[in-house]
């Protein structure tokens, strides 16, 4: 894991040493194990590293080969394949770091070879002979790369705080971007909170030459392929092969590997594969359990203590070192400003931090350097298959569609929105034409109807209009129902990384543990996108593919579980404990044009004033006190931190 930064003088003059020194100092807090800087004509770069793999100890930061200089945050999934493509013998490749190996690939085949480079990476490579700088982000947008350009310079870094070390880079939050964050409106993975700063999106390549700046996408999922296996047995076998590979290639580290393990299918399947790959290798697994002072709630639909089911997985794999980690070890605001600094963003889901941070701290104490997670698995490995209903209806098989919808309802014992509205009606009516109807509904229902209503509603119209325009772009058109759903899945996987990847990066920087996501592996996802919806839903049983694949690898209590586990069920205790500090934060923010322009301050004050003292009563208003208020409180703290009010 590395932090990188660089600057290119667009007039061709030598990069100033003082600017390089500023960047070198700014990256140092992000990587304590190794650091370096170098310049080549108009280009200068700096990097700092936290050693995660044995190969990280090889080579220098940045990497240079002849008239090329590369600085990168690079983890390669298949080093032998890269070495072969670069024309290197295995023994020669074994002496190179991942960055050096990538540099030799580019030297032999050009930067265009990045399309076939598997891994998590963000890099910059300068070719002095051609006077060309390329910034490149990996296929899924896992590693952040932020850039700034004006008529004189192009600068880039892993985090905004690094770029702010340069006098030419403005340190100014964009009020509209902050308001958009408050309502969780994404911008295709390229937006940041700051004026003039952009994020390189997934599979993005930005090229600067004497002729100017070009930005392009070098790779994309094929949404029109339908050549997946049609036999369910063959499909299960192929799925397991892809999934095992996705887990295996992310386990390279000189430390230990750990897994987040709830009782859900995404985390338990990843953990089972990691433990099953090599029975002689210890794998750590961590399950969050409620605060000791909280009595877990359980209904026919949900449960809050996931440890009993997680324990069944630990019993099945003898090399699994399983630990439960209690929530309540940190306060609501503990470490929040540190995360602002490392990521450059407010916190989207503050409630999740109450169990996530203790797990990462425990893992680091166990010597874990890599944590496997599956936060987007419901768009890939555990796709429910509810799209089958609209797919059948669009093909004229209305009775079959109705049959599946009824069986799904009977199995779930309740009528869910996504059975009818999202799976049947949404793909048929989604589009810009509904914008007037949405506006009428919002006006009728008032401010509370706004998405995640922490936002100042005076700022809402322009942001909502932009969101409606993006809906128009993803209309079905001639692509059909299947393409519509595939496009939405890919959007969730890669296009909503504008702040998520940076927040992950911030967590990694703070805890010294790298997060890797097998469920977002591009080969695995591409395979899953080629499958017919029938592979995932049949006779009302959803998530059929992953259930059948792990029928013998996981306990049946997990594989066929239809209830939903919930981590952080004790959130009301944390919010109640923080309400006094929330009030003080609001007082400190008084008079801030930035904060008051983004946040619905009167609504937040009213929520605080009306907050019950009883945690059960707070839980009964979860939409307000678990989502709206905590997110607004994090934004208020961010504004105070950014403006020096704390």
Image (spheres, helix red, strand yellow):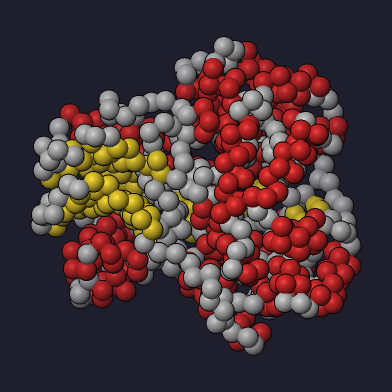
Residue at the spot 42% in from the left edge and 25% down from the top edge: 172
User: Residue 295 falls in which quadrant of the image?
Assistant: top right
Compared across the picture, whether 389 is left or right of 217 comes to right
Is residue 102 visible in this depiction of the protein?
yes
Q: Where does the image place residue 431, in percent across and percent down from the top left?
A: 65, 53
Give the residue at x 51% y 15%.
645
- Which percent across, then down, holds residue 104? 20, 64
Q: Position of residue 312 (x, y in %)?
A: 71, 65
Identified at 49% across, 53% down, the residue is: 515
Near-viewer residue (526 or 630): 526
Query: Residue shown at 43%/32% (left/top)?
Result: 194
Q: Position of residue 339 (x, y in %)?
A: 49, 34
Picture quarter containing residue 436? Answer: top right
Q: Relative to residue 321, is residue 231 depicted above or below? A: below
* Closer to the camera in the image, 26 or 111: 111
In the shown orientation, is residue 478 left or right of residue 449? left
Position of residue 608 in the picture relative to residue 399 (left or right): left
Instruction: Please give left or right for residue 48 compared with residue 210 in the image.
Output: right
Task: Work out whether residue 538 can be spotted.
Answer: no
Could you tell me how many numbered marks the image carries?
0
Quadrant of the image occupied by residue 77: bottom left
Using the image as rendered, state which of residue 370 and residue 318 is in the foreground.
370
Q: Nearer the viewer, residue 183 or 28?
A: 183
């Amino acid at each position: 894991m590395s932090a990188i930064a660089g600057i290119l003088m667009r007039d061709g003059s030598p990069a100033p040493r003082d600017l390089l020194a500023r960047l070198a100092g700014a990256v140092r807090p992000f990587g304590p194990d190794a650091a370096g800087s170098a310049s080549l004509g108009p280009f200068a770069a700096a990097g700092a590293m936290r050693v995660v793999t044995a190969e990280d100890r090889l080579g220098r930061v940045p990497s240079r080969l002849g008239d090329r200089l590369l600085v990168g945050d690079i983890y390669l999934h298949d080093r032998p394949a890269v070495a072969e493509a670069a024309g290197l013998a295995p023994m020669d490749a074994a002496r190179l770091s991942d960055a050096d190996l990538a540099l030799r690939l580019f030297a032999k085949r050009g930067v265009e070879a990045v399309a076939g480079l598997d891994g998590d990476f963000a890099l910059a490579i300068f070719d002095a002979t051609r006077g060309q700088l390329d910034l490149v982000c990996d296929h899924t947008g896992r590693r952040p790369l932020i850039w700034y350009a004006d008529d004189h310079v192009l600068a880039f870094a892993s985090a905004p705080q690094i770029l702010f070390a340069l006098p030419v880079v403005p340190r100014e939050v964009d009020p509209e971007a902050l308001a958009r964050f408050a309502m969780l409106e994404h911008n295709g993975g390229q937006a940041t909170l700051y004026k003039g700063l952009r994020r390189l999106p997934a599979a993005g390549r930005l090229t600067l030459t004497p002729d100017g700046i070009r930005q392009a996408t070098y790779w994309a999922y094929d949404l029109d392929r339908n050549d997946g296996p049609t036999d369910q047995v063959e499909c299960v076998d192929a799925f397991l092969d892809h999934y095992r590979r996705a887990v295996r290639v992310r386990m390279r580290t000189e430390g230990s590997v750990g897994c987040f393990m709830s009782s859900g299918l995404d985390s338990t399947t990843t953990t089972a594969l990691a433990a099953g790959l090599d029975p002689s290798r210890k794998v750590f697994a961590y399950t969050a359990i409620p605060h000791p002072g909280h009595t877990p709630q359980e209904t026919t639909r949900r449960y809050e203590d996931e440890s009993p089911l997680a324990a069944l997985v630990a019993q099945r794999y003898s090399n699994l070192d399983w630990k439960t980690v209690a929530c309540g070890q940190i306060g609501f605001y503990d470490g929040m400003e540190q995360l602002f600094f490392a990521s450059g963003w407010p916190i989207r889901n503050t409630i999740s931090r109450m169990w996530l941070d203790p797990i990462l701290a425990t893992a680091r104490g166990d010597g874990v350097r890599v944590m496997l997670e599956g936060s987007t698995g419901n768009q890939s490995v555990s796709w429910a298959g509810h799209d089958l209903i609209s797919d059948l209806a669009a093909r004229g098989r209305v009775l079959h569609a109705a049959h599946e919808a009824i069986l799904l309802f009977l199995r779930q014992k309740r009528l869910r929105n996504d059975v009818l509205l999202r799976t049947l009606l949404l793909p048929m009516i989604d589009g810009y034409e509904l914008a007037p109807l949405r506006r009428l509904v919002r006006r009728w229902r008032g401010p509370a109807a706004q998405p995640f209503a922490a936002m100042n509603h005076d700022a809402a119209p322009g942001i909502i209009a932009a969101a409606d325009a993006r809906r128009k772009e993803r209309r079905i058109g001639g692509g059909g129902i299947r393409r519509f759903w595939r496009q939405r899945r890919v959007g969730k996987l890669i296009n909503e990384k504008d702040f998520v990847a940076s927040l992950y990066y911030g967590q990694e920087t703070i805890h010294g543990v790298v997060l890797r996501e097998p469920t977002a592996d591009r080969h695995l996802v591409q395979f899953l996108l080629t499958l017919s919806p029938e592979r995932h839903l049949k006779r009302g049983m959803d998530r059929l593919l992953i259930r059948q694949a792990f029928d013998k690898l996981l306990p049946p209590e997990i594989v066929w579980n239809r209830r939903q586990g919930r981590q952080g069920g004790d959130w009301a205790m944390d919010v109640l404990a923080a309400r006094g500090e929330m009030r003080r934060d609001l007082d400190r923010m008084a008079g801030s044009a930035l904060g008051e322009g983004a946040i619905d301050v009167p609504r937040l004050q009213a929520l605080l004033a009306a907050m019950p003292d009883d945690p059960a009563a707070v839980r009964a208003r979860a939409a307000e006190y678990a989502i709206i208020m905590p997110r607004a409180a994090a934004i208020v703290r961010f504004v105070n931190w950014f403006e020096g009010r704390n």
